Amino acid sequence: MRRILLAGAALAFLSGAVEGAAEEPVPPPVTTHHVVTVAGRPIRYAATFTEKVLHDAAGRPQATISATSYVRTDVPRQTSRPVIFAFNGGPGASSSPLQFEGFGPRLRLKAADGRQSIADNPDSLIGGADLVFIDPVGTGLSRVLPGGSGKPYWSVPGDAKAVLGMMRAWLRTHRRERSPVIVAGESYGGARAARICADAGDLNLVGLILISPSFDSSPEKATAAQRDAAAVALLPTMAVAAAQNGRGESGRPQAEVFEEARRFAIGEYSAALAAGDRLSSARRRVVADRVASFLGMSPETVLAAGLRVDPEDFRKELRAADHLVVGLLDTRVTAPVPRNQPGRPSQANDPALGLGASNVILSDGITRYMHGELAVPGRRPYVSLTLDVNFQWDWSASVADPASRDLAGNIARTMRAKPRLKTMLIGGFYDMAVPVLGPRRQLEQAGAPMQRVHSAMLWTGHSVFDSAAERKTMSRLFAPLLNRPD
């Protein structure tokens, strides 16, 4: 899944395709005041919704980008508190998974009958940092304006420029330019965070939180070495997927399977891929046999794939005997084989995505929250996910933008330039879209100071903080980064 990362299993909460709505004027910022109990303590905060107009070079309004911020109002010396700027991925996903299933002071809940409600989040990060959730153009309540275009903002460099501009505007408006800044990105949001790093020298950047991060900005331009590195990172995750679904090494603890596959992948398997045509037939067969034993496939299938089994083919074949497909974003999730839809990417039918046949999905619960509790004017629906943005994404723009071609390198250079900057990598063992082994190896190869890179591998899928137990894990993981006790 190189073009459609999206937001993960959290999207199963979403319902209803977006219908057209009358155009509404861009509202001024609106602030409301609230109290939430976190870790048994009441916390007072101000919630502010801001919609910023983006203009072209001639000054014509094109689109809007929006942010929902949560700032504590019951603490002194507010400027010394960290500010977390958070966004999800897609491209085409809103910030809703991190905002309403992770960091924010409010949680989205789903009743048995499908109705959504909003409740307090007892594990919110607002105790240790102020929170700003950014919805890029076309997501959330952000939009393309009449006579405008989203095209300038639907590419790796264009998107990063718009989001960084929103971050700077927020810091300036709130007089927080000197505050410690932490950037949190999930999925494609990791690519966005990495591209932002290239131009963020003016920010007091002290932390990066990268959740299931994708550093792949131009898949068609990948080198042979990059393709081999991707295959190496994938193999241990695919071995766990096979074991989870009753294939491969299913009779053993999955942690053992992952570790054995990891050692094989970074050693013998990596060397075999690097050898290419120089690899002897006998050695190729030995490697294929071992890959096949991990994946529960025939050696002939592995050989026919050039030792690199495509994850899309793998997830379709793994439970084919049961007429099921396995999730790419979460290999624990299965669903009946979908009907053929010409022109629709296979990844869009990932059962872990929860998308169905729709291209644009909204959240009724978040829509009510935004226009009710936060008093945002108008009636626009909150767009949680839109494949329409994803399908229009201009990946080719990365080719002409050096900073978009070396995303892991951007992080490495920024960490070397900012000695206080720490990076937290978080991933799930059941995520085949961004294998948990990949991002850390990419940062190592880019020359990042790894003593300041902390990794957490969790027994989750692509979206790692969906449950209450996982959110409690989140609070513990981020405590050192926020300079507060566990």
Image (cartoon, rainbow, N blue to C red):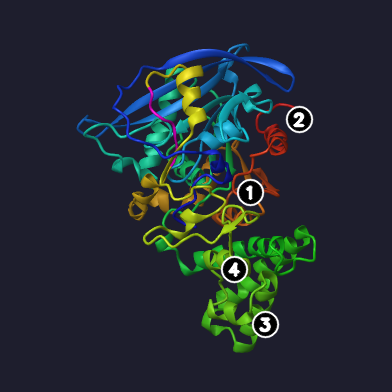
Q: Earlier in the sequence, mark 2 or mark 4?
A: 4
For image coordinates 70% across by 66% down, the residue present is 261
Image coordinates of residue 110 in percent, x first then y, are: 60, 33
In the rendered structure, find residue 286 and report the number of the disc placed on it: 3
Query: What residue sits right under mark 1 in the picture?
Result: 427
Check disc 4 and report its element: helix, strand or loop. helix
Q: CA distance from mark 3 to mark 1?
A: 31 Å
Let me know if residue 206 appears in the view.
no
Which is more toward the observer, 455 or 444? 455
Foreground mark, 3 or 4, reads 4
Residue 129's quadrant in the figure? Answer: top right
Let me know if residue 170 appears in the view.
yes
Image coordinates of residue 415 in percent, x first then y, are: 56, 42
Q: Are marks 2 and 4 in contact (CB under 8 Å)?
A: no
194 up-or-down from 201: above or below: below
Q: Which residues are magenta?
A: 379-385
The disc labelled 3 sits on which kind of residue?
Val
In the rendered structure, find residue 473 and report the number of the disc placed on it: none
For image coordinates 29% across by 27% down, the residue present is 22
In the rendered structure, find residue 320 and report the number of the disc placed on it: 4
In the rendered structure, find residue 486 and report the number of the disc placed on it: 2
Q: Earlier in the sequence, mark 3 or mark 1?
A: 3
39 up-or-down from 348: above or below: above
**Residue 480 on the magenta span:** no
Which is more toward the observer, 430 or 127? 430
